Amino acid sequence: MSVELFEKIPNNVNLSSDKRLQRALEQWLPNYIAWWKEMGPEGFQADQVYLRTAISVEANGWAHFDYVRMPEYRWGIFLEPPEPGRIIGFGDHYGDPAWQEVPGEYRQQLRRIIVTQGDTEPASVEQQRLLGQSAPSLYDMRNLFQVNVEEGRHLWAMVYLLHSYFGKDGREEAEAMLERRSGNPDKPRILGAFNEPIKSWLDFYMFTMFTDRDGKFQLCALSESGFDPLSRTCKFMLTEEAHHMFVGETGVDRVVQRTAELMRESGKDDPESVMKQGGIPLDMIQRHLNLWFSLSEDLFGGEVSSNAAEFFAAGLKGRYKEQDHYEDHVALTGTYELLVPHADGHLETQQVPLRNAMNEVLRDGYVADCQRAVDKWNRTLDRVLGPRAEGHKLRLPSRRFHRHIGVYGMESGSFFDPDGHLLSSADWTRRRDHFLPTERDRLYVQALMKPVTEPGKIAGWVAPPARGINGQPFEFEYVKHIVA
Ligand code: BYC
Ligand code: FE
Ligand code: FE
C-alpha cells in the first residue's frame, strides 16, 4: 500500500483515486480544525510540541518524532494492509469471505458501532482540554498532547469509514461528531464515562489507565470484525493506543511511588502526614481508582445484551483475541454463569446463553488486565516500603460496585460495596464517601495541581518517569511554550 504523505490528508488508502471521497473529507477538514481549536488543549495551540506522527503502518518506522504546533499536526488515515483471502472469523457467517463493502442487512448496526466508537475520541479530548495548564512536568504535558492528537486521529479513522461506506447519512454522522460536547446536557457524548469531568492529573492517569483500556478491548473486538475496513483501521489504532495505556499505568505507578517515598521518609503512614508533605494519600488514590474503574466497566454495556448477541451473530464484533483464545467461533451452544441480584438481596446464578453474554466475556478480559496493573502498583509499594506496605495495598473493586449499566446498576436499586456485598440504599449513602472521591479529596488534589514548566523539574506529588520519550532524557524540552 503506498503512502500519500504530502496530500492535504496524509493516507495509505489511495484517497487521490476517489475524488468525491477526497473532496468530502477535505470539506470536513476545516470543520475538524475549527473544533480542535475550540475544544482541543486550551492555551497551547501556538506551542511547539515534541510529538510522534503516524507516517506509515510498518511495524518499524511508522512513527516520526518532531516539534509541531498542534493545529498543524498531520492527522492522517492509516489502515493495516489487507490480508489476502481473509475470512469472517466468527458468528453466523463464519468462514465466508470478509466484507469489503457494508452488508445491507447490517448497515444500521455497523453505523451505530462506528459512530459510538468515533464519538468517544473527540469526547476524551474535550474532557482533557484544561489539563495542560496544570501539568506536573513538560514530559507529562507532552504525553497529554500526544494522547489528544492521536484521539483526534482516531476520530479521523471512524470518519473515513463513515464517509467512504455510508453515503449521505455517514457524512451527517461525521458532522454530528463535531457538534456533540462532553458533559453538555443538551448535546452530550454518547457513552456515560465520556461525559464525566477529568479535573485533575490523578483523574487523567486513571482515565488513560482504565478508560483507554476499554478502548483497547473494544478495538480488539472490532479488529475481529467481518467488515474488513473496520478491522484494518482498528488494528492500526491499537498501535497508538498502547502509549495511552502506558501513560495511565505508569502515571498511577509514579503517584503511588511518590506517596510511598513520602511515607518512608517521614516514617508515618497516616493520610494526614502524607498530605502535610504535599503527597496524595493512598486512600485517596484508592477512591479515584474505584471511581474510574467502575465508570469504565460500564462502557462494556449490560451483562446480558441482545445487542451484543446480534453484533456477534452478524460477524460485526468478536471476542478479545477471537482466533487465538477460542475454538468454537459460532458460540451457539454454551452458557455463561452470571451472578444476578434478586429482589430479596441475595445473588443467584443465572445461565446466560453465550452470545448474549459477550459484553461480560469481554469485560472478563478487561478486569484481568486491570488486576495485573494493580498488582504491579502493589509491587511498587513493596519495593519502597518493604514490610510496611502490608495494610496499604491497592485493590480493584468488585465489578458489582458503583455500576450504572446492567444487572448491578444502581438505577435498579442494588447497591454494592467494593467487596461486592449488597448494601441498603441508606448504607450506600452513608458509606459512599469511603468508596468514592469526596468533595474534600477533589479540593485537595485540585490544590496540588500547580503547573511545573521548567525542563527537568517535576511537581512534588508524583515521581519522575524511569525514562523520557523516544530516547530523549527527562530534562528534554518536550514543549516549547510560546508566550503570546
Ligand atoms: N453509557 O445492550 P446494552 C475508546 C446503552 S473507548 C451510555 O447492554 P450494548 C476511548 C446502549 O447503547 C471504546 N449508554 O449495550 C477510550 C443500549 O442503548 P439502546 C469505545 C450505554 O449495545 C478513551 C442500552 O444501553 N468503543 O475508544 O451491548 C479515550 C442497552 O445496552 C452504555 C465502543 O464502545 C454506557 N456506558 O453495548 C478515547 C465500541 N452502555 O440500544 C477513546 C462500540 C450501554 O437501548 N460500541 N448503553 O438504545 C459498542 O460495541 C456498544 O455500543 C457498547 C454497549 C459496548 C458500548
Ligand atoms: Fe482512541
Ligand atoms: Fe486512547
Image (cartoon, rainbow, N blue to C red):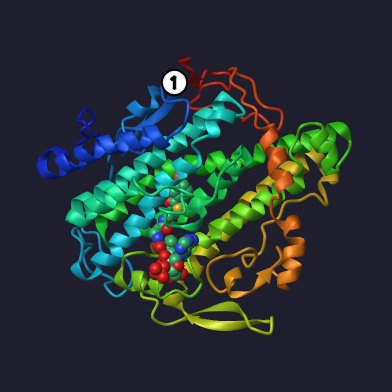
Residue sitting at 48 percent across and 26 percent down? 43
| Left or right of 436, for residue 12 | left
Q: Look at the picture and state if 413 lies above or below 240.
A: below
Residue 55: image location, x then y, percent: 30, 32
Q: Does residue 379 lie above or below 331 as drawn?
A: above
Q: Nearer the viewer, residue 210 or 72?
A: 72
Q: Secondary structure at mark 1?
A: loop
Classify mark 1 as within 8 Å of ligand 3 or not, answering yes or no: no
Q: Residue furthest front?
A: 186
Q: Quadrant of residue 71?
A: top left
Q: Residue furthest right?
A: 267
Residue 371 appears at what percent x and percent y? Answer: 63, 56
Q: Could you tell me which residue is drawn at 45 percent across and 15 percent down?
A: 484
Vertically, is 113 above or below 280? Answer: below
State the image coordinates of residue 5 (x, y, percent, origin top left). 23, 30
Answer left or right for 19 relative to 30: left
Q: Is residue 7 visible?
A: yes
Q: How many marks?
A: 1
- 237 sits to left or right of 257: left
Which residue is rendered at x = 47% and y = 54% of the image?
185
x and y percent of residue 331 in the render? 40, 76
- Name the residue that disc number 1 marks: 47
User: What's the residue type where badge 1 is placed?
Assistant: Asp
Which of the image's four quarters has the N terminus?
top left
Residue lying at the far top in this picture: please name it. Answer: 483
Residue 56 is left or right of residue 362, and the answer is left
Mark 1, Cα crowd under 10 Å, few <14 / some 14-19 / many 20+, is: some
Q: In this rendering, does residue 83 appear at all? A: no
Is residue 281 depicted above or below 132 in this figure?
below
Q: Residue at the spot x=63%, y=63% of the render?
A: 402
